[in-house]
Image (cartoon, coloured by chain):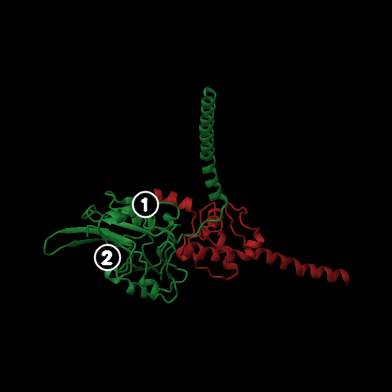
Chain colours: A green, B red
């Protein structure tokens, strides 16, 4: 009896020893393997399983604050001007309900639709949707016809009228092409947040993967009431607004 | 007679070689070095790599760090002005002017080394 107990005791000790040592080995090896993959593996394409989106909490968005717009301009090298010929990738919209007098403020940009009209109308397939839901302009193909600007119900796109100099090496922009919010695709591909989301002092812009049920944005979209602007058009935008 | 002929030939050849050498573009290769293929292969095929890479990167999101315009510029921008397009003997300009091939990459893309650009724009 005592012998059996002793053996059991040893077995348990041995088992726990093996468990911890295997665990430690896995912890030691795993990051190395990941780094190895990143260093030597082929770079991966944008995944179709991901759907990048934003949830904008209009109750947290302050009237008069333009930090997101400033951050966008700085990140993407926009002049910040608001004349009809200046590029605007994101703009602040102030709304007032006439009957109740309720005022609110929200940022408006490319809504990264699932069925983007800009892509439908583009004659050169310069306008396209990446696998992860980001709607972009391929400026190598853009002929500057501006059909997409006409088709967009959100007025999200701009045309570059003047020659540009000293662009951000990560954000090529040039005269004669149409451009819009890229959701800071160059930052997303590096695992960072879009500049506007990072700059918002009230954390009103929540960025993430709408398809990943464990992500903060997916859980919040499930939990709180949010709407898509012009949902009647059934474009299924990736940008959602809360408190609108 | 033979000697005269030979000396005449020599007289004709020397300036020809001289002139040819004087015309060959001498680009400022910046930091230089080889990371993709050997220089002769690159002279012939760099445009195919760049064109393939730009579509992969933009449309599919496959960002190959090595075969990218940004990475070319990182090493080949001049050590004097951090650019591949600023002067007549800059890395891209020197040959493209010689061959009379117009490139419009840099109407949109920055021709400046990213590290230098960041440094300049941080101030």
Check if mark 2 and mark 1 are on a common chain.
yes
Residue B56 drawn at (x, y percent) = 51, 63
Left or right: residue B63 versus residue A103 is right
Q: Chain of mark 1?
A: A
Residue at 27%, 70% in the rendered image: A232
Residue A234 drawn at (x, y percent) = 31, 70
Quadrant of the rendered image containing residue A242 = bottom left
Quadrant of the rendered image containing residue B36 = bottom right
The residue carrying mark 1 is A215
Residue at 42%, 64% in the rendered image: A173
How many numbered marks appear? 2
Residue at 22%, 57% in the rendered image: A243
Label 2 to label 1, Cα distance in Å?
A: 22 Å
Q: Chain of mark 2?
A: A
> Considering depth in this image, is B93 or A202 the residue closer to the camera?
A202
Task: Point out the tag, 2 or 1, that comes first from the N-terminus.
Answer: 1
Q: Quadrant of the C terminus of chain A?
A: bottom left
Residue A201 drawn at (x, y percent) = 28, 49
The residue carrying mark 2 is A229
> Considering depth in this image, is B82 or A138 the residue closer to the camera?
A138
Does residue B77 appear anywhere in the picture? no
How crowded pointer 1 is (Cα within 10 Å; few <14, some 14-19, many 20+) is rated as: few
Q: Secondary structure at mark 2?
A: loop
Return the residue found at the far top: A2
Does residue B21 appear anywhere in the picture? yes
Q: For the residues carrying marks 2 and 1, which lies nearer the camera in this image?
A: 1
């Amino acid at each position: 009896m005592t012998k059996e107990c002793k053996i059991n005791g040893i077995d348990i000790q041995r088992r726990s020893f093996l468990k911890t040592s295997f665990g430690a080995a896995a912890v030691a090896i795993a990051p190395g393997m990941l780094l190895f993959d990143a260093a030597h593996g082929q770079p991966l394409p944008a995944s179709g399983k991901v759907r990048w989106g934003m949830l904008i909490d209009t109750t947290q968005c302050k009237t008069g604050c333009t930090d997101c717009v400033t951050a966008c301009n700085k990140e993407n090298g926009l002049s910040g001007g608001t004349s009809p010929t200046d590029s605007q990738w994101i703009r602040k919209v102030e709304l007032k309900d006439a009957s109740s007098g309720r005022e609110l403020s929200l940022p408006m940009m490319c809504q990264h639709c699932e069925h983007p009209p800009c892509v439908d109308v583009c004659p050169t397939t310069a306008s396209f949707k990446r696998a992860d839901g980001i709607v972009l302009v391929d400026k190598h193909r853009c002929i500057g016809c501006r059909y997409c600007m006409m088709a967009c119900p959100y007025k999200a796109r701009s045309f570059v009228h003047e020659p540009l100099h000293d662009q951000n090496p990560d954000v090529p922009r040039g005269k004669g092409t149409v451009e819009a919010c890229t959701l800071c695709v160059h930052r997303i591909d590096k695992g960072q947040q879009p500049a506007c989301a990072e700059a918002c002092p009230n954390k009103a812009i929540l960025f993430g993967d709408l398809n990943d049920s464990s992500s903060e944005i997916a859980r919040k979209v499930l939990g709180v009431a949010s709407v898509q602007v012009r949902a009647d058009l059934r474009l299924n935008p990736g940008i959602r607004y809360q408190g609108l | 007679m033979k000697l005269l002929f030979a000396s005449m030939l020599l007289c004709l050849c020397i300036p020809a070689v001289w002139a040819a050498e004087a015309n060959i573009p001498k680009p400022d290769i910046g930091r230089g070095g080889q990371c993709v293929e050997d220089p002769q292969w690159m002279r012939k095929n760099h445009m195919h790599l760049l064109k393939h890479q730009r579509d992969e990167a933009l449309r599919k999101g496959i960002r190959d760090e090595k075969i990218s315009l940004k990475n070319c510029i990182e090493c080949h921008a001049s050590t004097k002005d951090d650019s591949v397009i600023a002067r007549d003997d800059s890395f891209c300009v020197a040959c493209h002017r010689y061959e009379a091939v117009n490139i419009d990459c840099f109407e949109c893309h920055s021709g400046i080394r990213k590290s230098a650009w960041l440094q300049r724009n941080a101030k």
